Amino acid sequence: MKEKNMGIKTLTKNRIKAPWHLWLMGLFFIFIYTNGIYDYFMMLLHNVNYYNSKHYGEDVVKYFTNYPMVFLIFYTTNVFCGLIAPILLLFRTRWTVLVSFVSAISMLCLEVLTFAFRNRWNVLGPWVSLFDIALLLMTIGFFFYCRALAKRGVLK
């Protein structure tokens, strides 16, 4: 009987407790990327009411009409991996690191390509462009955060 209890205590001692900020970061990024997925569907399905609510003009409608496949792949990968990564974080799995990395890289590629080849700054405007750059930096930061948690043994 004592051996079983000692095994449970040892197992409990070896498990690293999830820090409070893990929950904050996970929920924050779920919120961010849930909104991102909503935006993704509204933009690509050309929801006129959504465009009007954001005060987007005809240039934005044209920008997302016949959106190139390469950009669509990066966009899709970013928003879905961006949502999956914080969910995995809440389950404390090491897969979080890989999925957050894929999200960050796909977003970086998307932004580099759209700024270089789609005139993103002029079409979407400075506010949206700067907001997206801030999201990119936060997504990269989230990857490094997840990697640090994995190195500390919080993610298994």
Image (cartoon, rainbow, N blue to C red):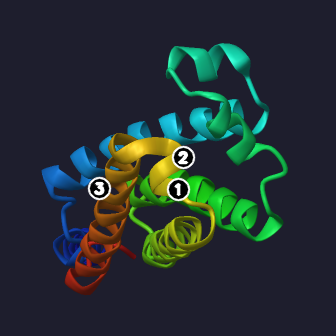
Please state which of residues 142 and 75 is positioned toward the viewer in this rendering.
75
Furthest toward the bottom, the residue is 151
The residue lying at 48 percent from left, 50 percent from top is 122
Where disc 1 sits, the SS reads helix
Query: Residue type at mark 2?
Result: Val
Whether residue 136 can be seen here: yes
Q: In this rendering, would 20 be left or right of 144? A: left
Q: CA distance from mark 2 to mark 3?
A: 18 Å
Please state which of residues 42 and 84 is positioned toward the viewer in this rendering.
42
Q: Position of residue 43 (x, y in %)?
A: 67, 35
The residue lying at 16 percent from left, 73 percent from top is 13
Where disc 3 sits, the SS reads helix
Residue pointed to by mark 3:
134
Residue pointed to by mark 1:
120
Q: Position of residue 23 (x, y in %)?
A: 26, 47
Dot 3, crowdedness within 10 Å: few (<14), some or many (≥20)?
few
The answer to whether mark 2 and mark 1 are in CB contact below 8 A is yes
Q: Position of residue 130 (x, y in %)?
A: 32, 52
Assign the C terminus to one quadrant of the image: bottom left
Residue pointed to by mark 2:
123
Q: Position of residue 67 (x, y in %)?
A: 78, 54
Q: How many marks?
A: 3
Q: CA distance from mark 2 to mark 1?
A: 5 Å
The residue lying at 40 percent from left, 60 percent from top is 89
